[in-house]
Amino acid sequence: MSDYSLLIDGKMVPGDMTMPVLNPATEEVVAQCPRASREQLDRAVAAAKAAYPAWAATPMEERRKLVIRMAEAIEANASELAHILTSEQGKPLADATGEVLGMAGFFRYLGSLELPMRVIENSGDRKVEAYRRPLGVVGAIIPWNYPLLILAFKLPSALLAGNTLVVKPAPTTPLASLRFAELVKDILPKGVLNFITDANDLGDHMTKHPDIRKISFTGSTATGQKVMASASQTLKRITLELGGNDAGIVLDDVDPKKVAPGIFEGAFQNSGQVCLAIKRLYVHESVYDEICNELVAIAKNTVVDDGSKQGTKLGPLQNKMQYEKVKAFLEDARKNGNVIAGGSAMDRPGYFIEPTIVRDIKEGSRLVDEEQFGPVLPVIKYSDKDDVIRRANATTYGLGASVWSSDINRAHEVATRIEAGTVWINKHLDMAPNIPFGGAKQSGIGTEFAEEGLAEFTQLQIINGPPAA
């Protein structure tokens, strides 16, 4: 068990308490992790506040160089970070390595962006300029499904824009984040970046804190509602990337053998623990049986095991609470549908669920109406295009969706009618740092990635005066 520490005001410090972190593949303790007290959170915020004026005044090119140096530190330590990530999150080592390298890629791209001044008007008697100014202290709250990658969705943009940060990783996956903090602590001036941990008991204090100017949160819609309500007390800026019940719509002209692997990957990546995963698959009646059969064949040949073992395709669910939730969804599936692959928790230590395909199920069942966030896919039959679009949109969620067809024009027409922040055609989960990302309806507020995401870490300032002499 390695030693882990909090990062507060440029120093690695012990927590005022500790908490165990478990390996979800074995249910054994990986490490005793520091757990911050409320006083330590306040110290981290105070450090970030004190560091803010100098950091905001640092030329953007200097801030950019430091963000890129952080990317270099990630790449130089990718193997170590990936092994820690697998041990605490459960995902296969190859996927964990991909996450770490993706993290570095986000740092590099987002760190390359600009915040240019824009001249809105320059007329005879008026010159209007638009500037993007930093906000101050930003609080970043990170979930457990992609603890390093989602950190990279927020941290480089916040720092590049001139803000300082207090980061709170999820209680069940804090270790790789704390190791990252240790690797980069000497790159930045003290206080610019701080990491604290908790046992889900500091979030409310963080979102209410009067010295935090913005909260960037990724997690469930239910928790996002609490974050929004809490942050409203000080009118904090917020970015919320929340849950989804993403629909995949398979049109009648597909080749089932060609599309099934992409559909399976879009639904079962990270054992289904992806906010943007396919959560409901609508398949036209003419290809319904074939699609179901192809998905079953893939599911039955998918290796589910400890993520540290070579050849593992899917690891365990990350924590016991989510494991119990998914088992409840399996019970619902057996009552309301026909389980044709998987359907059970695996009889072994760890939080393992068989990859499960459920057919002959409809709206009104929990598995279709709610977000399962696990390796269980309902496959729903439809016959009419307009009807399936209505059914796909009949949800409070609107994060992502996909349309599968051999006719791109037909797929595009359907895609334009789906109420979601991102709609893919003949693919799913294709994301990149240059493509803006955000949810519709109760799947979120605001945008991440690209120039639009960078702007969310700034305050728009207009300077309106006469033209220069």
Image (tube, rainbow, N blue to C red):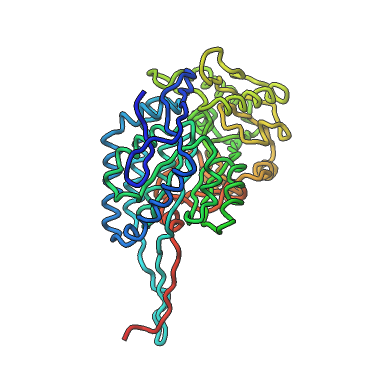
Total numbered circles: 0
**Left or right: 402 in relation to 430:** right
Q: Quadrant of the C terminus?
A: bottom left
Residue 184: image location, x then y, percent? 30, 42
Q: Is residue 98 left or right of residue 247?
A: left
Q: Name the residue located 68 percent from the left edge and 24 percent from the top edge.
A: 333
Assign the N terminus to one quadrant of the image: top left
- Which residue is at 41% across, 70% downward? 130
Q: Is residue 133 visible?
A: yes
The x and y percentages for residue 173 are 45, 32
Who is closer to the viewer here, 159 or 385?
159
Residue 194 position, x and y percent, is: 38, 45
Tell me which residue sits at (48%, 23%) in the image.
Answer: 24
Q: Nearer the viewer, residue 278 or 467?
A: 467
| Residue 303 in view | no
Residue 468 percent coordinates (x, y): 33, 83
